């Protein structure tokens, strides 16, 4: 049934888009049909019998192939075939009168022309439907269905299989761009992007519109090395601005490429692998990335981990470790940062970096954050009952801040443990803290302290920093690890400390691993430090031991 459907579809496509190379074949078929109709009429007695109507078959077929001209001319040929060269009665050899066959020819012409008009209308409608199915009217590009058919043609073509590469291209910052140029120019924007890219593609490279902010590029006849090299060069080319309504626009694009036949035996597989490569490029902060088998293995592994999160919460496989924060002026531990670990039944103890990045793209990160808050506040209450007062820091992601129930859940947790005030600190990255000010203001109203995490890795300006709703700046470990040897890092850290104090904020350096680094930060006037030199993250039971070690308990 499927093969019959495909045969009929190919027949319709062939009819709507005639191939010049097959015209000779069509002419031959028409000649045979006219010849057979003549024989049918002649050997059954002549034109006075009903078999003369068999000539309508080639007339209709001519209209099908050539539309109105074909139906008109087909009718004339039918009139001649069944006219002067066809006897009225073949048995006795009586020929037709002129008026007899001429009037019949007029009927053939009328019927052929009407058939041609009908097929012309049907053909135009089919082409319109086909264009809607295989072509995007906004970007004015062939779409993903058209691409898939093209790939199937390359793979299953009569001339043998042909190598090709697929590049998946995503425009990440399109919402920011539309904020600038106006959402009424959305369609025009996608049209200009498509035109901009298409105009710079070489021969055998074609652009297809996939969906939303995603395009795909087909490189026909390219070997693997050439695909990778072209992807790299094209990624660099996309760094140049595109002019839209007089505004230079920079596209933030991610590219992922895959190659046939190395990365898949079907069109779907190769397209999927290019998407995986693009997604990994985005995760790693790269402009482009070519597919490798390890990417799929890691993706499958991460996908399976995501499916285990809820069950792991129920089975209490997650645990909290705490890393102390050391006050350099008072020379004592004053707080701890709560850090989640997953005691996985097969993989053992997993650090946050092994599972948190994948969860930050899903709502699972909210479940984990609420669990961390509840457990951290529970441990804080337990320490407080023992006479230990420590500030507790909890990491919050942008996904948490954007969730519609975040503040509601925070209020529920605070009410459950009756804890708030300045002893609970929320650590938020520099980038996130600049985009979620309204939520942060409401958290400050609830008594939380706010800390800018990984300071120096984002894009906040000095002019804007004074308006950030934060109490503490945490200098990223990337500036601290080599501070005793690298003069540039040393000067940057010194400047951040002075700036933080000038803005009335406390400054903490994370990633301190040596005594030399600690002493140097103390000389610079840094308020506090955190790192392996003080202590690695430890279970809550070890916190009391650390306090005793520093003669605080």
Image: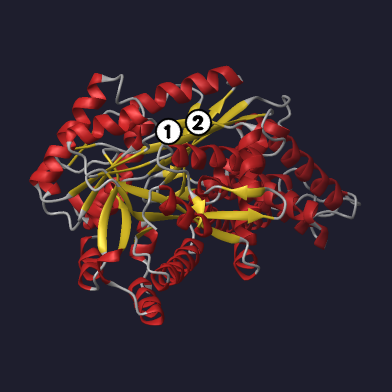
Figure label count: 2
- Where residue 422 appears, as percent x and y from the top left, is 25, 66
Q: Residue at 18% of width from left, 58% of height from top?
A: 469
Q: Position of residue 505 (x, y in %)?
A: 16, 50
Locate residue 313 relative to residue 266 in the image: left or right: left
Which residue occupies 31% across, 49% down? 332
The dot on residue 289 is 2
Inter-mark Cα distance, 2 to 1:
7 Å
Q: Quarter of the image holding residue 518?
A: top left
Do residues under tags 2 and 1 come within 8 Å of each other at their CB atoms?
Answer: yes
The residue positioned 36% from the left and 29% from the top of the image is: 481
Judged from the image, the secondary structure of the residue bearing numbered disc 2 is strand
Q: Which mark is residue 286?
A: 1
Residue 246 percent across, percent down from the top left: 13, 39
In the rendered structure, the answer to whether residue 359 lies left or right of residue 163 reads left
The one nearer the camera, 489 or 12, is: 489
- Which percent across, then down, holds residue 416? 41, 81
């Amino acid at each position: 049934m499927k093969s019959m459907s495909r045969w009929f579809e190919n027949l319709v496509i062939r009819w709507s888009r005639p191939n010049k190379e097959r015209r000779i074949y069509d002419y031959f078929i028409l000649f045979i049909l006219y010849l057979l109709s003549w024989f049918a009429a002649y050997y059954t007695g002549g034109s006075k019998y009903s078999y003369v109507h068999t000539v309508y078959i080639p007339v209709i077929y001519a209209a099908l192939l050539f539309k109105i001209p074909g139906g008109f001319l087909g009718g004339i040929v039918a009139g001649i075939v069944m006219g002067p060269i066809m006897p009225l009665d073949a048995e006795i050899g009586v020929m037709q009168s002129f008026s007899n066959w001429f009037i019949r020819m007029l009927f053939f012409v009328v019927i052929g022309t009407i058939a041609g008009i009908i097929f012309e209308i049907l053909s135009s409608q089919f082409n319109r439907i086909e264009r809607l199915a295989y072509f995007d009217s906004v970007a004015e590009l062939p779409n993903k269905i058209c691409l898939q058919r093209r790939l199937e043609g390359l793979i299953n073509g009569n001339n043998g299989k042909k190598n090709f590469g697929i590049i998946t291209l995503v425009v990440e910052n399109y919402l920011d761009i539309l904020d600038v140029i106006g959402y009424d120019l959305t369609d025009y924007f996608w049209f200009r992007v498509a035109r901009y890219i298409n105009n710079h593609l070489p021969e055998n490279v074609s652009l297809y519109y996939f969906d939303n902010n995603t395009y795909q590029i087909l490189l026909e006849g390219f070997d693997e090395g050439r695909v990778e090299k072209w992807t790299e060069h094209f990624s660099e080319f996309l760094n140049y601005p595109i002019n839209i309504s007089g505004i230079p626009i920079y596209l933030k694009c991610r590219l992922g490429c895959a190659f046939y036949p190395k990365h898949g035996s079907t069109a779907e597989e190769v397209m999927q692998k290019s998407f995986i490569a693009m997604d990994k490029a985005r995760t790693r902060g790269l402009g482009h990335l070519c597919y490798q088998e390890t990417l799929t293995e890691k993706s499958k592994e991460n996908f399976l981990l995501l499916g285990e999160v809820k069950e792991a919460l129920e089975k209490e496989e997650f645990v909290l470790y705490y890393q102390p924060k050391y006050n350099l002026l008072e020379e004592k531990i004053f707080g701890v940062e709560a850090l989640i670990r997953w005691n996985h039944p097969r993989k053992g103890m997993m650090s946050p970096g092994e599972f948190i990045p994948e969860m930050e793209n899903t709502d699972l990160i909210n479940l984990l954050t609420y669990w961390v808050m509840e457990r951290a506040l529970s441990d804080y209450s337990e320490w407080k009952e023992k006479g230990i007062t420590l500030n507790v820091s909890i990491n919050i992601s942008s996904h948490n801040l954007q969730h519609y129930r975040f503040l509601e859940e925070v209020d529920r947790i605070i009410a459950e443990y009756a804890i708030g005030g300045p002893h609970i600190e929320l650590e938020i990255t520099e980038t996130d803290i600049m985009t979620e000010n309204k939520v942060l203001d409401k958290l400050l109203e609830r008594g939380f302290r706010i800390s800018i995490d990984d300071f120096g890795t984002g894009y906040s300006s000095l002019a804007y920093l004074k308006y950030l709703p934060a109490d503490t700046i945490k200098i990223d470990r990337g500036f601290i690890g080599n501070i005793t040897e690298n003069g540039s890092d040393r000067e940057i850290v010194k400047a951040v400390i002075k700036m933080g104090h000038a803005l009335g904020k406390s400054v903490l350096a994370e990633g301190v691993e040596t005594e030399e680094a600690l002493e140097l930060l103390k000389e610079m006037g840094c308020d506090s430090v955190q790192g392996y030199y003080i202590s690695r993250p430890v279970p809550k039971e070890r916190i009391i031991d650390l306090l005793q070690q520093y003669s605080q308990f």
